[in-house]
Amino acid sequence: MPDADKTPLSGKDYGIGIPVANPAFPLRGANNYDWGMKDRLARIFNPKSMHTVMLAFDHGYIMGPTSGLERIDLSILPIADLADCLMCTRGALRACVPPTVNKPVALRCSAGSTVLTELNNEVIGLEIEDAIRLNASAMAGMVAIGSQFEALTIKNLCQLVETGNRYGIPTLGVTAVGKELTRDARYLGLACRVIAENGAQFVKTYFCETDFDKVTAACPVPIIIAGGKKLPEKDALIMAYRAIDQGASGVDMGRNIFQADAPRAMLQAVRAVVHDGFTADAAMALYEDLKAKG
Ligand code: R5P
């Protein structure tokens, strides 16, 4: 029991005349969320830059042992410390990622058809209780706008948003990767906006060469870009630079990091673009330098 405070009223500092601080939460669209939701988002998006470098290694849920992810313990754990957030399935998380890694997790929550059948026929594959048990900082669900699974996957997204809002866990809506879907600004802009309107707190999509700034402008919540298939390192850095320059709030990159010649160096180079405003040339020079130093 603390002693009763005997300080006279006149000796206390009430800060009379100083307005009570009430800072806005600087992430796009997030100012009206509750405390827990903001706290989780602030673990994913660096509060200084309000950008994020997420490391994606959830590919196995549709692709099986993807190149570079045959052994997550050997490829991902040695670089996980450099990521702001890990994106993976609950299976990989429990089996391969020690909790001592201590990184926020964007948990892949939609599940369904694999590359062997028809992609995008998905359901929500886990109960919110398991996301809470795993201390997920976000739940991710795929949405296939414009496909035969459009309504189904929007329903999945709404389910994640509904349960996530109940417990303060943000939802990441992921635009689908179906072969028949065109990745131009018209499609991506529509898909991202639909995902945001259905309540996702952030959206993952692909960069497009033309008018990507219109995709980000018309999306009221942060957009992060997936890396897609492996590119030469310089091209991947150019893509990251252009995406950030045109309004993306970060990357959720997988193959262009864990399939790079020097994954740690690549992750640091991507961080330099996303958080420190490096140009692609400067980031490439950093990559070469770090790679040479081993
Ligand atoms: C795809 O199945 C996953 O959602 C990946 O997380 C996403 O595509 C990002 O990985 P990558 O940069 O390799 O495309």
Image (cartoon, rainbow, N blue to C red):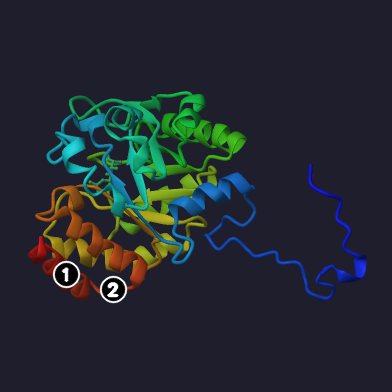
Q: Residue at x 44, y 44 (%)?
A: 172
Query: Which residue occupies the extreme right position in the image?
Result: 9
Q: Is residue 37 left or right of residue 14?
A: left
Depth order, front residue of 2/214: 2
N-terminal of the pair, mark 1 or mark 2, is 2
x, y percentage for residue 251? Answer: 33, 55
Amino acid type at mark 2: Phe
Q: Which image quarter has ligand 1?
A: top left
Question: At numbered mark 2, what does the secondary structure look like: helix, strand or loop?
Answer: loop
Q: Residue at x 22, y 43 (%)?
A: 76
Q: Is residue 11 left or right of residue 194?
A: right
Looking at the rendered image, the quarter that the N terminus falls into is top right
How far is disc 1 from disc 2 in space, using C-alphas?
Answer: 9 Å
Q: Determine crowd level at label 2: few under 14, some 14-19, many 20+ residues with C-alpha closer than 10 A.
A: some
x, y percentage for residue 264? Answer: 19, 55
- Visible in this render: residue 65? yes
- Residue picked out by circle 2: 278
* Location of residue 288 with respect to 63 vertically, above or below: below
Amino acid type at mark 1: Met
* Location of residue 97 with respect to 203 vertically, above or below: above
Q: Is residue 259 left or right of residue 11?
A: left
* Location of residue 198 with respect to 51 vertically, above or below: above
Looking at the rendered image, the quarter that the C terminus falls into is bottom left
Q: Residue at x 39, y 36 (%)?
A: 107
x, y percentage for residue 87? Answer: 34, 42
x, y percentage for residue 11? Answer: 86, 70
- Residue picked out by circle 1: 284
Depth order, front residue of 48/60: 48
Question: At numbered mark 1, what does the secondary structure look like: helix, strand or loop?
Answer: helix
